[in-house]
Image (tube, rainbow, N blue to C red):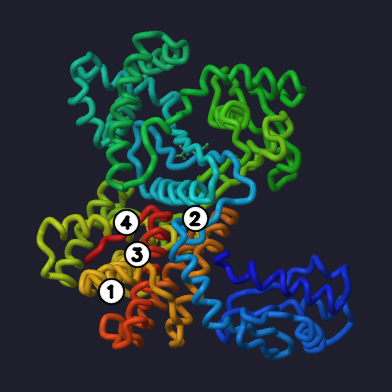
């Protein structure tokens, strides 16, 4: 059962029914973790009004019927009417043993498993991936892993921006550089490794040379008409970009692969049909030649209705039409009932309008629903948008390299005995772990300030802190005598010391925390949890000898507790997309 609340709650419900009657059987006992005891039930406070008695009296009435024999050793009323619950060490030990022997460590499948589309990363071809895309990539990847662990069928969709008017000038620039012919793939890939520079060169030429601009415009027409040679050039170009994205994903160790790329271009042939359907249903209006839908409830400051433009005045289709086509594809072809969009907060209104239009068009009907998993910005030390010292956008690839370099320096200082090869591996795990963890550990909707020293610190709510606790566990096992290690795998768990008790209670929470991330889509809850596990483990390790415990049973129990801690930390970090080195 793992989560003690699952055992405690039905007992409370029975007591509520006995004390106040059947109509109270649905009441939430409101049991939560507490600092003073293991758990605290707040139900008496909530019920006080309903039954017309002071909370303390309500609590007494509940206690008169509450049967927690064998589960809790101490049940006390505190303050105005909180019910404090202290788990019995034997019951707790029994549950900890069960989780330790559960291959999924208490992470259960959701009661209803569904097909979930996670739209994340979505960089733009011909533009550099920047730190803004780091958030989407890291958050989305973690959510995909968590939802999979909860038994859902997750479909990753990388909605890359690979279509639109800039491709006209990009293709012409490509031809001017003589890279259009087959056999130049490597040179092409090299020249667009610096995508921003390539884009800027094309842009500068576009602005300065009318002939080039004209060629570019004609190229757009050819592209949109699907002219074969133009499409071939375009695709050579996007292939090179995908290679670059793939390299970044590999570096970041995210689960996003080439096959998840379903870019804007994929939906291009479907756009006339989408607009046609909106027109047929009478949802579209023509406004200055543009086809618009005005979803209900969206107005500007002056109260004027806001349009979602599905076809522009020049006949071209834009971002909104593509998003509608993608949404329809996700519900009808992919069969998803939960659609997640891991996209920055500035696109809130765009997505809300897309969802509203999709609902009225019948493409998004219950049980299917869409959620914008919005996130804030990464800020520099000056609390403004994160920029390089020269004022440019920070490139993702460079950021990752710097993280790994800095981690290597930290590891060299912390563990000089580590050989060079091992150090390089650990530095990568710590550096990338730190970049991901800092992004995941604060409430995603908030902006955060990028701070190398804080994110790479071995103290505090950081990746290295959690990774270090895990490495500590593994190091205990390297030093333990083999007989104890073997015996610990089946050893009885004994929780006599307060630090053991506290760690045991924490370890039982893993499944509930993962489930809550699946619901709220807030990975920071998992970070906070892992930080707590690491902290409780460190107190346990300070206060209780493991290898030096005289009593064999105690020694083996402590090894078992340490091992479970290590497993929970490793699995939890894995759900965040972070590796857990065995030594660091
Ligand atoms: N390519 C877009 C950008 O870089 C993000 C796309 C997000 N996904 C979507 N379905 N609109 O801003």
Q: Where 358 sits versus 568, above or below? A: above
Q: CA distance from mark 2 to mark 1?
A: 49 Å
Look at mark 1 in the image and give the residue it sits on. Answer: 484
Q: Where 184 sits versus 119, above or below? A: above
Asked whether, in this view, residue 21 is left or right of residue 327, the answer is right
Q: Residue at x 63, y 36 (%)?
A: 354
Q: CA distance from mark 4 to mark 2?
A: 25 Å
Asked whether, in this view, residue 207 is left or right of residue 178, the answer is right
Q: Residue at x 30, y 33 (%)?
A: 200
Q: CA distance from mark 3 to mark 1?
A: 30 Å
Q: Residues within 10 Å of mark 1 (few under 14, many from 20)?
A: some
Q: CA distance from mark 2 to mark 3?
A: 20 Å
Q: Residues within 10 Å of mark 2 (few under 14, many from 20)?
A: some
Q: Nearer the viewer, mark 2 or mark 3?
A: 3
Look at mark 3 in the image and give the residue it sits on. Answer: 463
Q: Is residue 133 visible?
A: yes
Look at mark 4 in the image and give the residue it sits on. Answer: 579
User: In which quadrant will I find the N terminus?
Assistant: bottom right
């Amino acid at each position: 059962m793992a989560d003690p609340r699952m055992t405690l709650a039905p007992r409370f419900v029975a007591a509520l029914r006995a004390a106040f009657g059947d109509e109270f059987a649905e009441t939430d006992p409101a049991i939560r973790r507490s600092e003073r005891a293991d758990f605290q039930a707040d139900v008496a406070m909530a019920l006080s009004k309903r039954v017309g008695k002071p909370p303390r009296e309500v609590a007494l009435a509940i206690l008169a019927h509450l049967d927690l024999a064998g589960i809790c050793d101490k049940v006390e009323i505190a303050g105005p009417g909180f019910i404090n619950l202290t788990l019995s060490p034997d019951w707790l030990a029994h549950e900890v043993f069960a989780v330790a022997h559960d291959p999924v460590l208490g992470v259960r499948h959701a009661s209803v498993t569904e097909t979930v589309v996670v739209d994340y990363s979505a960089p733009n071809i011909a533009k550099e991936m920047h730190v803004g895309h780091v958030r989407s990539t890291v958050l989305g990847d973690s959510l995909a892993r968590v939802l999979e662990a909860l038994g859902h069928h997750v479909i990753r969709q990388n909605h890359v921006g690979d279509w639109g008017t800039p491709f006209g000038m990009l293709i012409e620039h490509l031809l001017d550089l003589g890279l259009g012919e087959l056999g130049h793939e490597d040179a092409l890939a090299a020249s667009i490794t610096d995508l921003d520079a390539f884009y800027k060169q094309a842009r500068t030429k576009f602005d300065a040379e009318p002939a080039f601009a004209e060629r570019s415009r004609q190229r757009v027409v050819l592209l949109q008409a699907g002219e074969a040679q133009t499409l071939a050039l375009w695709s050579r170009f996007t292939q090179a970009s995908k290679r670059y994205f793939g390299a970044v994903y590999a570096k970041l160790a995210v689960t996003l692969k080439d096959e998840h790329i379903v870019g804007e271009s994929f939906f291009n042939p479907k756009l006339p049909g989408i607009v046609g359907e909106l027109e047929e249903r009478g949802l579209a209006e023509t406004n200055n030649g543009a086809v618009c839908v005005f979803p209900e409830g969206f107005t500007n400051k002056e109260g004027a209705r806001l349009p979602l433009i599905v076809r522009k005045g020049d006949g071209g289709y834009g971002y909104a039409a593509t998003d509608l086509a993608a949404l329809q594809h996700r519900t009808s072809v992919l069969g998803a009932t939960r659609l997640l969009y891991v996209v920055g907060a500035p696109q809130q209104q765009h997505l809300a309008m897309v969802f509203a239009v999709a609902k009225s068009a019948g493409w998004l009907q219950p049980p299917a629903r869409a959620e914008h998993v919005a996130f804030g910005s990464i800020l520099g030390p000056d609390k403004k948008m994160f920029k390089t010292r020269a004022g440019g956008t920070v490139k993702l690839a460079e950021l990752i390299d710097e993280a790994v370099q800095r981690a290597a320096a930290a590891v060299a200082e912390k563990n000089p005995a580590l050989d060079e090869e091992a150090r390089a591996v650990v530095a990568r795990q710590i550096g990338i772990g730190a970049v991901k963890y800092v992004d995941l550990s604060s409430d995603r909707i908030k902006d955060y300030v990028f701070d190398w020293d804080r994110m790479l610190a071995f103290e505090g709510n950081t990746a290295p802190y959690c990774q270090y606790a895990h490495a500590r566990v593994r190091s205990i096992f390297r030093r333990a005598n083999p007989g104890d290690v073997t015996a610990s795998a089946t050893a009885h768990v004994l929780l006599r010391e307060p630090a053991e008790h506290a760690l045991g209670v924490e370890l039982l929470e893993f499944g509930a925390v993962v489930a809550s991330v699946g619901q709220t889509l807030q990975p920071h809850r998992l970070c906070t949890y892992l930080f707590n596990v690491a902290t409780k483990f460190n107190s346990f390790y300070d206060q209780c000898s493991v290898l030096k415990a005289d009593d064999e049973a105690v020694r083996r129990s402590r090894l078992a507790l340490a091992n479970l801690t290590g497993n929970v930390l490793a699995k939890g970090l894995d759900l965040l997309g972070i590796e857990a080195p065995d030594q660091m």
